[in-house]
């Protein structure tokens, strides 16, 4: 982050006193979301599944400018892990004000070759976790008459993707979930929105052959991949300034149209 941006954020911390849970927060988009919300004052809980070292690295980076940060292990595809994760946060902080449903996996293959295991793994992590986490957190948001739920969907949930019927189904389901829950929670000062990243340069994309990367970027009007930091800024906008925005899909995709 630019030094000037950090200095300005230090002067204005609109998320001071708010507790944010970022699932899948140890890498990529999730890590940048955690850093961005922390920069603006939020107490951050970085959720991770197995890579404790990467999660602690994110915590270390955030700690340099915001000491209210911790990491908690938990597999959000498992309801027992979700229960423990939420209980630990509530015991430590008393509330969860901002829920970022970001955790996700891929198990790509053509549908004719897709196994039930690959289908269930993606649906459990990407979609079912949305239900179970929100179910745990929402009653506390209703009680305090405040909440921000931001679901990280994808352009694949809007346009589809070859070999990604499981992933597309989950990400499209997130959008329907977002729009429906927003109708139920608007009167409680709780907003529910989705951010739909386009093709974003993460570790996974970095492993794609250069020729394939060029083919993808040729379809993007901006002519390049997005960055995790650019996705994080959209999330921060919804968390900080999105009081009258709910039930929406914010597309951060370099100008692509579905």
Image (cartoon, rainbow, N blue to C red):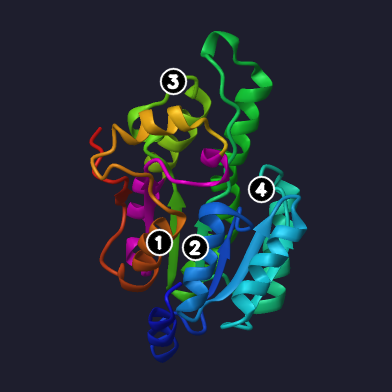
Residues under numbered marks 2 and 1 in contact, where contact means CB atoms less than 8 Å apart: yes
State the extent of the magenta-drawn residues as a range: 178-206
Mark 3 surroundings: few (<14), some (14-19) or many (≥20) residues within 10 A: few
**Which one is earlier in the sequence, the residue at label 3 or at label 2?**
2
On screen, residue 148 above or below 231: below
**Which one is earlier in the sequence, the residue at label 3 or at label 4?**
4
**Residue for badge 4:** 76
Direction from residue 47 to residue 196 in the image, left or right: left
Q: Between residue 137 and residue 193, name the one nearer to us.
A: 193
**Which one is earlier in the sequence, the residue at label 1 or at label 4?**
4
Task: Tell me residue 30's x, y (percent).
Answer: 54, 56
Direction from residue 53 to residue 113 in the image, left or right: left
Task: Tell me residue 16's x, y (percent).
Answer: 48, 84
* Residue occupying the point 38% across, 42% down: 175
Quadrant where the image shows the C terminus? top left
* Residue occupying the point 43% across, 44% down: 153
Figure disc tally: 4
**Residue for badge 1:** 235
Task: Tell me residue 102's x, y (percent).
Answer: 53, 51
Q: CA distance from mark 3 to mark 4?
A: 26 Å
Q: Which residue in the rendered view is the most extreme toward the top?
A: 112
Q: Would you say residue 96 sits in the magenta stretch?
A: no
Q: CA distance from mark 1 to mark 4?
A: 20 Å
**Residue for badge 3:** 162
**Which one is earlier in the sequence, the residue at label 2 or at label 1?**
2
Foreground mark, 1 or 3, reads: 3
**Which one is earlier in the sequence, the residue at label 4 or at label 2?**
2
**Which one is earlier in the sequence, the residue at label 1 or at label 3?**
3
Direction from residue 66 to residue 78 in the image, left or right: right
Helix, strand or loop at label 4? It is loop
**Residue for badge 2:** 33
Q: CA distance from mark 2 to mark 1?
A: 7 Å
């Amino acid at each position: 982050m630019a030094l000037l941006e950090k200095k300005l954020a230090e002067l204005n911390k609109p998320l001071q006193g708010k507790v944010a849970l970022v699932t899948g927060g140890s890498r990529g988009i999730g890590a940048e979301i955690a850093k961005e919300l922390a920069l603006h004052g939020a107490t951050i809980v970085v959720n991770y599944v197995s890579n404790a070292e990467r999660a602690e690295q994110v915590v270390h980076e955030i700690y340099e400018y915001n000491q209210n940060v911790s990491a908690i292990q938990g597999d959000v595809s498992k309801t027992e892990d979700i229960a423990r994760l939420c209980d630990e946060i509530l015991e430590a902080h008393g509330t969860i004000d901002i829920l970022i449903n970001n955790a996700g996996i891929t198990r790509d293959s053509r549908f004719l070759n897709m196994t039930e295991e690959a289908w269930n793994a993606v649906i459990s992590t990407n979609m079912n976790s949305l239900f179970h986490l929100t179910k745990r957190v929402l009653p506390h948001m209703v009680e305090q008459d405040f909440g921000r739920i931001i679901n990280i969907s994808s352009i694949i949930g809007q346009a589809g993707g070859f070999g990604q019927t499981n992933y597309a189904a989950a990400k499209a389901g997130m959008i329907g979930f977002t729009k429906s829950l927003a109708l139920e929670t608007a009167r409680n000062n709780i907003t529910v929105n989705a951010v739909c990243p386009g093709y974003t340069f993460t570790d996974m994309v970095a492993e794609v052959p250069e020729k394939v990367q060029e083919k993808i970027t040729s379809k993007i009007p901006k002519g390049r991949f997005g960055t995790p930091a650019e996705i994080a800024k959209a999330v921060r906008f919804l968390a900080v300034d999105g009081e009258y925005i709910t039930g929406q899909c914010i597309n951060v995709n370099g100008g692509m149209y579905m």
